[in-house]
Image (tube, grey):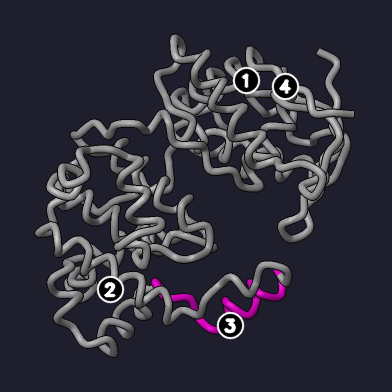
Amino acid sequence: MELQKDIDRGVLVIKSLVDAFNEKRLFTCSHFPEDVFPENMEVGSNEHLVYISMISSIAYLRKEEQLWCLTRDAYEDSEGHIIFEPEKVLSTSLEDLERTMRQFGLLLSAMVIRQWMLRNPKTANRRELESHDLEIWTNMAQALMEFDCDIEKLLKHYDFDALKIIDDFARGKYSNCFPEYHRERKVILWLVRLQRYGKHFIKNLDKVPMPIGMHIIRATFMTGSVWGNANSIMTDLHKFLSDYWYDVAKKGQYLFKLAPIEFQIHLWILSKYGCAVGRREKQTCSSQQECPLKEFCTEGTFEILGTYVKVDTKRER
């Protein structure tokens, strides 16, 4: 069976997700992980955007809710605050910087890394040791210093064009500011955060393909937006789904003025707090009754083994 898609259903799914989130009825998630920021920090200020940029550089393969809480605690501490000031980061010895970051839990311990590798044997070789996080942090500090730690100046340098920024930070001069693991996805999510909290419009975000991960794939199939039988070896699911959600955003712009990469977080929340808990390779969902998207729920299975995905879903409505 070939994959089937329903653009109109996708529009309704996103509208329902956005409404549920705004009304605080999207499971227990009432805010985005990055909504946790230091007390008295002015939202959208340059200080805030630099803070977001530093954290976004190492926000991968870890629980983001925990990461943003840890960074807030570090920022509010007199000793930890300096690691968020690029000039001081670059003037501090690597030994002292590592000690401070480790003190506030911003560098993963060897034990945590080993546990992650055991749970993810097929992708473990993509995860560098925590020393790489330290290197990424200093690289981001250096990049920001080249723009005088002024996010507006950085954006202006690229004519506020998302495509130009992504090209340079994912593949060009500043690509060492983000991890190799899904680097472009991390750069895109950084820009989404700058757009969400910043005061400047970033052009061409609507032309940036939605980053597709396991949560997005699961949520797409579990809502019946796309359905059928396929696996990630037979089908290029990432491109298929990225193209699908681009079409949804284009058709649904009258309901929600969001680019695909801006509403992908809502699909991520649905999967993480709903589908991933209620489905787990089961035909029906045990979380259906409490789910604000229950009217869209499909039957079928979604299996994950490392980076391999197998999907077999159907829908009656």
Q: Earlier in the sequence, mark 4 or mark 2?
A: 4
Residue name at image x 40 percent, y 63 percent: 178
Asked if residue 37 shows in the view, the reply is yes
| Mark 4 or mark 1: whose residue is earlier in sequence | 4
Which residue was labeled with disc 4? 5
Q: Which residue is mark 1?
A: 10
The magenta stretch is 106-120
Q: Earlier in the sequence, mark 4 or mark 3?
A: 4
Please name the amino acid that badge 4 sits on.
Lys
Give the crowd class for mark 1: few <14, some 14-19, many >=20 residues within 10 Å: many
Q: Nearer the viewer, residue 118 or 6?
A: 6
Q: Earlier in the sequence, mark 3 or mark 2?
A: 3
Q: Residue at x 65, y 72 (%)?
A: 124
Q: Amino acid at mark 3?
A: Met
Contact flag, marks 4 and 1 (Cβ < 8 Å): yes
Task: Tell me the kind of residue under disc 2.
Answer: Thr
Which one is in front, 5 or 173?
Answer: 173
